[in-house]
Amino acid sequence: MFHKEGQKIILTTFFLVCATVLIAQYYIPIPWVKFTVQIGALIILILILQFFRNPKRKVIKNFDDILAPADGKVVVIEEVEENEYFHDRRRQVSIFMSPINVHVTRYAASGSIKYSKYHPGKYLVAWHPKSSEENERTTVVINTPKFGDILYRQIAGAMARRIVNYAEVGDSVQQGEDAGFIKFGSRIDLFLPLDCAITVKLDQKVVGAKTCIATTVEKDEE
């Protein structure tokens, strides 16, 4: 199944590839050149299809865990100052999405949307230290039953030119549901409470709506 955000691009690419294959078949007399052009066009179509794939995943919802909002690799785990919404210290976990990853953004937790804002910006490579604050991005805050407010940020990369964000203030959202899409881009930052327990490690590959990123910490009884 393919994501709805890719429908126009997929259809356009399909017709262009069909036209290219037919033109090459009838107007390029040199066999190896014709074959190269046709195979190249088909490869482009396959890459577009794999980029916009949207695998359906059975989500085991619970309030005690924060699930990965996207497929990719953990590139940052650190305590930082979050200056857009919280203006205090938070645990940041960042996930980098390569071009071969599924680029669907999924809600990491169930709750209600308190804040949702789009920021135009630059297109630095996604692993650049300043990409979280200077690139095109959206910031969303979800109020959750166990973690309180958590924030996630969709960040465009060097190739991305459009971030799709479905979250609107007041919405009630469910863990694992589609939250948006980053077209040809590339990173999601999570900002979590300091007292949560991070359950992933640097360079770990995570699966959206499956891998647990953080969990609540049970306090010892006094």
Image (cartoon, rainbow, N blue to C red):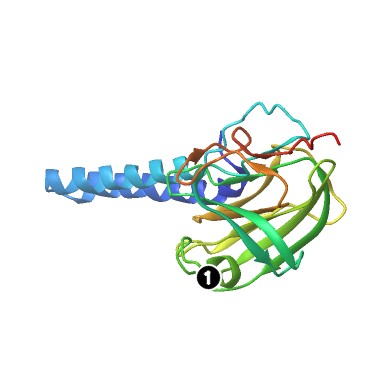
Q: In this view, does 46 lie to the left or right of 136?
A: left
Q: Quadrant of the N terminus?
A: top right
Which of 71/9 is in front?
Answer: 71
As helix, strand or loop, the secondary structure at mark 1 comes to loop
The residue positioned 32% from the left and 49% from the top of the image is 20
Q: Which residue is drawn at 76% across and 31% down?
A: 62
Residue at the disc numbered 1: 130
> Residue 74 vs residue 220: left or right?
left
Q: Nearer the viewer, residue 208 or 178?
A: 208
Q: Position of residue 154 (x, y in %)?
A: 62, 57
Q: Neighbour class for label 1 at 10 Å: few (<14), some, many (≥20)? A: few
Q: Tell me which corner region of the image, top left, top right, bottom left or bottom right, holds residue 78.
A: bottom right
Relative horizontal placement of residue 90, taking residue 9 as reference (left or right): right
**In terms of image quadrants, where is residue 220?**
top right
| Residue 184: percent from left, percent from top | 49, 55
Q: Which amino acid does label 1 sit on?
A: Lys
Image label count: 1
Identified at 47% across, 41% down, the residue is 204
Name the spot of residue 199 as percent of width and height, x first. 60, 38
Give the x, y percent position of residue 222.
86, 36
Q: In this view, does 148 lie above or below 162?
A: above
Image-based side of 82 in relation to 113, left or right: left
Front-most of residues 96 and 22: 96
Query: Is 188 rendered above or below residue 144?
Result: below
Name the residue located 27 percent from the left edge and 44 percent from the top edge: 38
